[in-house]
Structure formats: C-alpha cells, structure tokens
Amino acid sequence: MLAVGFFRRRYLIILTFVLLSLPVAGLYLAVTPPTFTATAMMMIDTHKTQLPSPAFSEASADAGWIESQIGILKSTNVASYVVDKLGLAGDPEFTKSEAGLLDRILAFGSAVWDRRHSPASNVQSAPSSAGTKGKQLAVAAYLAGLQVRRVGPSYLIRIEFTSHHPVQAAKIANAIVDAYAFEQLNAKYQANQRTSDWFRERLETLRQQTAAAERAVIEFRAKNNIVGTASKPMSDQKLADINSQLQAARAHTTEVQARLQRAEAVVRANQSGLAKNETISDTLSNPIITKLRTQYLELVNREADWSVRYGKNHSAVVNLRTQISEIRRSIADELDRILETYKSEYAIAKSRETELESQLSGLMTQAHGMSESEVTLRSLESAAHSYRKIYDDFLQRHTEAIQQESFPVTEARLISPASVSKHGPLASSVLMMAVLAGAVLGIGFGVLREMLDDVFRTAGQIRSILETECLAMIPLLRIRGRSPAMPPHHLLASNDHEPRHISGKPALLQRAINEPYSPFAEAIRLIRLTVDSNGEAGRAKVIGLTSCLPHEGKSTVALCFAELIAKSGKRVILIDFDRHRPALTRTLAPNATVGLFEVLLKDNSFADATWTDPGTGMAFLPMVPRPHSSVVTDIFASEQAEGVFELLRMKYDYVIADLPPLGPMADVRSTSRLIDSYVLVVGWGSTKIGIVKHGLSSSNARGVRENMIGAVLNKVDLDTIGRYDTVGKHYYHYAS
C-alpha cells in the first residue's frame, strides 16, 4: 500500500523523467554506429579417418582438450594469420587507437624528442615501427571483437565476431576456421618433421649396431667351425617346455590345495553347527546337494509356519525338525564325499609337480654340460636378432612419419558459414533501458520529494503526529468571479449609536451559506458537531480558533463557522482577537473605531463596538489595533475580561474567537481562562510538521494543548488529495 500511495502521488515526476529519457535514447541511437555479429559453426571431428601418426599419440577429446582448442582459436597466431590474410592492419576500424587525449599528447612529445635526438635511426625504423604498431592494434581490435564458445557437450564450436561492417564480420568469422586449420596443419608438420629427423639419426645408429652384431655371429661360426641352422638346440627347447609345464602344475596344485582347505573349513563349520549357509563351488553344480538344500529350505519355512500356528512342541513340528536334521546329515555326507574327491585331486597334482621337478633338475644338469661355444653363439645370435628387430621397427615408423607429412589432414571443418545479425544498438533494448533508467531516476527524485515533503496531508497524520482528532478536512476555496466592492463607510451605519451592519462581504466568505451542500459547508458542520458534543449541555460555548503560522485560513474558518451556526438560528458572536493581523476586522468592519480593547477597558459599550450581519444575525466584535498597547496580555488575563465573557455567555449561545497564531507572543496563552475549547487550523500541504509540533510544545501553547478538541486541515486540494488519501478523495467526490 505504501508503494501504491507513493506512485499515486509522484507518478507525474516519474512520467516526466521517463519521457525525458526517450529523446536521450533517440540521440544515442542516432550517434552510435550499428554493430553486426557474424556467427559461424565449426566442428572438430576427432574420429575422422587418417593415417596413424607414430610420432605422437592424439590427445583424447575430453572437455579439457576442447577448451585447449578454443584457446588456440583465441591465440595471437590465429589472429595474426587472419589479420595478414584479410589485410586488417590497413583497416581504420581495426587500427584506430583508443588512447585518451593525455596519452596522445605524451606520445606526440615522445616522438618529437626521438626525432630530434636520433634522426637517422628514427627515419630508418619509423616505417617498420609504424607497421608493427598497426598490426598490434589490428590484432588487439580483432581479439576484442571475437567470441568463441563450445556448444553444449558436443564437438561444435560457435565462432562470433562483432564489427561495424556486416560483410567484414562474415569474412573474418569464416577466415578464423581457415586460420585454425592452418595452425593445426603447421603444428603437425613441424612435429612430424622433428620426429622424422630424430628417426633418421636413430636409424643410422641402429643400422651400424645391427651390422656389427651380425658380423660377429658370422665370424664366430667361421672361427669355431659351427655349421647348421640358427635355431635353438633341442635341450633348450625341452628345458623351456618342462619349465612351462612345471609352472602350470604348481598353479594347479595351489588351486586344488585352496579348494581342499576351503572344503575342510566348510565341513568343520557344518559339523560344529557354526555356519549353516557355508558352501563351496562344487556344491552349486551338485544335483544331490541342490535337491537336498531345496528340501531343507522348504522344511525350514514349513517348520517356522507350523510353529506359529500349532506351537513348537506339536508333533508335526517335531517331525519336521527331525526331517530337517536328517537332510542336514545327508548334506554333510555329500560334503564329506566332495572333500575326499578334493584330497584325491590334490594328491595327483602334487605327484605331477614332483615328477616335473625331477625332469627339470635332470635337464638343468645336462644343460650345464653344454660347450662354451654354443652358449657364446646363442648370445651373439640373440643380440643380432634384437638389433635387427629394433631397426626394422624404427624403419617402419620412419616411413609412416614421412607419409604423414604428405597428408594435410585436420580435424576442423566449417559446417555452417557465417550468418550476420545486427548486434546493437537495438532500438527496443535501448528504449527499454532508457525507460528503465528514467523510471529509476524518477523514483529516486520522487523519494527525495517525499523526504522533503514534511507537511500535513492526511487526517491520519494529524491523529498520529499531534495525537488529537482531525475534526474536518476543509476544501480549498477558489475565487469564482470578482467579489462585490465594500460600500462606503457612511453606508455601514446611520450613526454611532445605531447598530452597525456588515454588508458587501466577499462571495468567497459566504460559500458555506450560499452553498449549504458543498464539501466546504459539510466540513464546517463537522466542526460544529464536534464542538456541540464536547461542551456542557445548556452552557454557552466559547471556541477559539488558532494556527501555528499566519495565512493558514483560521480567520476564514472562524467566520464561516460562526455564519453557519448563526444561520441555524443560534445566537453567535464572532470576536477578532488578532491585534497584529486583524483580518476579520479589515474584511467585515474596515472603518471600525471601537473594538474589543475598548469594551474590555470599559471605554465603550457593546452597542458601540458590535456589528451585525443582517443575512445571518451573527454579531461581530472587531479589533482596533493600538500602536502602543503594552498591556494587552494583561487585559486578556484580567478578571475584568472574565466578567465580560460571562456576560457574553449569557447573551449568546456561541462565542467564536479568532485568535492570533501560536508564536513568541503570549496572547493565546492569556486567553486560556476565557476560552473553553481550542481548534487548531493547519494548512494542508503548506504547514511544516516540525513547526506545528514546536508550536504546540512551547510554553505559550500549554493551555491550547490541554483544551484542544482537535485540529482542522484547511485548504485541501480536492484534485490532489487522492494521491495521499483515497478515503478523503472518495468522500469529497461523493459529497460534491
């Protein structure tokens, strides 16, 4: 609700700022050059068929590898290739400097200094330096407009480039793919070239080593007269076979021994009753044990069920326990049979292992008797064979590396040529941002106005801040045409002893009488209702109207209040107490020479000082200021004044006093013995809250505060009240 009320009050400010932001947005759109973004799609196909490279293994295409390729696309090598290929170093869009004015001045001064102190070298290096700087600026501008992103978890790469020219942006986006392919091919070529050079050096060394080993074998055969094939001797073949068989026999024996130990553990556990569910692998395929376990589980379930139904000691349950025990014994017997089988297999495996060990021992003894020449020959042949194998393998890899150099295959390919779209400034986005900025500024300025608007606007403020009732909210009276002129003084009264009649009042002051059903008249009636309910029945009511500042309309409210009561037939007298600004006297009796002071001092009678309104019957006692009246306050607080007011109570039903504003003077406080109730008039939208609080808290207003029956909000603008008080708005619209 607070926000709604705020926008209702300050919507004009917010709307003004929003409307002012629109021309700013239009100016920005007019002076800002458009930018275009070209988007190309590239795929890095890691599964493309190509010759395998022995030089290096391809990296796995994981997320890190893809990010590395994105880094290559953003590298300065690719940027330099694109800049050189498209000649961007000569394009003003890419070579304009973004340096500030101070940087440009310093750069110009540095150039002048260099030319003066080293003219020769400067002339020679100037073109080269200018060209290098132009390329650096172009590369920097290119990298600033480049965006490379991976499309989800795929191998697709989105390449975006932003430029002021759509055709240029599309060319650059497509050229980036070519630059990446060139960079990849160049990297592979250099890697293969380095690998090929290394292979070449290594092959030369291996070739020499292989030739030397083979030459040593031939020379040894010739020297020792060894003629035959290069195959191994029969004893060595047997020794290898027996050794392999022995290893297999030992593995089999270990396996059989492990199964035997497991079977023995299961049998012991089953005999002791510690493990009812232990089993071994052979029992899983044994049909007898499988059948017995099925019967065992069925009887156990039945025994548990019958125990619940018939009790544990029932004969049928006992019979089931007997059958379960017999089945367990049968399972144990079958396990014993399996155990004996394992023991037999273990004995056979152990015997086989012992026999092979005996054969191996004999062959080893026989091998020790071999001649020294055969051992040496086998060693030489083995070395020659190893060198030959290594040489052939390296020769094959060298051939593949050479072939790889001649195949320009790359993983990257362009799958979607660059498409261009306008990047900015977008009119809709700029207008939206401008409207948003204008709204924010308007709200901020509105909040500032709210903070500075420290005045009374609603009846709720009167109740909460002043802790008193708001008697009425009196609408602002607007002048309708010209008011009739006051008649000359000689027409106001026939002589000094005849009653003086008020005539020629401004129409503005007769609104409550002339328009009895207007919101203004209704507000005045609300004041009277409160006054009537507050006073004692049958006793005349003395009401004083005051305000904190001048020009808050208290005199107008007092006059209209008195007229409305007089119009209803009551005896009413209106007294002007304001000796500093006697507004009522200037309006109703500007030529009066006798007033309140003269009556209180008994210089004149009521008949000499009282004026009468012939239209309503209201009596009026004016105030004739005295320039040197230093005892006014004492007169108001005197017993003589109390006596005069007692006579007024007896003669009139209502005594309405237009009091001066609350201030440094003590006039209002001195009337506390004369006035029954006070009504505070507060100017709507003009009187500061702090001033009213200070005025009521001062020592001069102590009697006013104690006897105040409420406050009145005066000069309420009905066209604006709805922004602050929706209830008041609807009420006055209904009343009008």
Image (cartoon, helix red, strand yellow):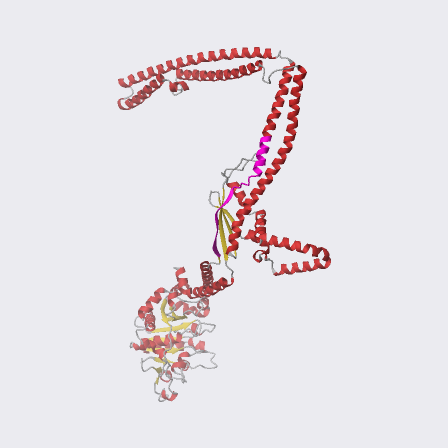
Classify residue 353 as left or right of residue 585.
right
Q: Quadrant of the N terminus?
A: bottom left
Q: Residue at x 61, y 61 (%)?
A: 101
Classify residue 636 as left or right of residue 651.
right
Q: Which stretch appears magenta?
A: 395-423
Q: At which x and y percent is residue 163? A: 52, 55
In the image, residue 647 above or below residue 263:
below
Q: Nearer the viewer, residue 324 or 624?
A: 324
Q: Is residue 271 visible?
A: yes
Classify residue 412 as left or right of residue 648.
right
In the image, residue 591 above or below residue 16:
below
Q: Nearer the viewer, residue 395 or 438?
A: 395
Rendered image quadrant of residue 530: bottom left
Q: Is residue 649 visible?
A: no
Q: Is residue 411 magenta?
A: yes
Q: Quadrant of the C terminus?
A: bottom left
Q: Nearer the viewer, residue 280 or 171?
A: 171
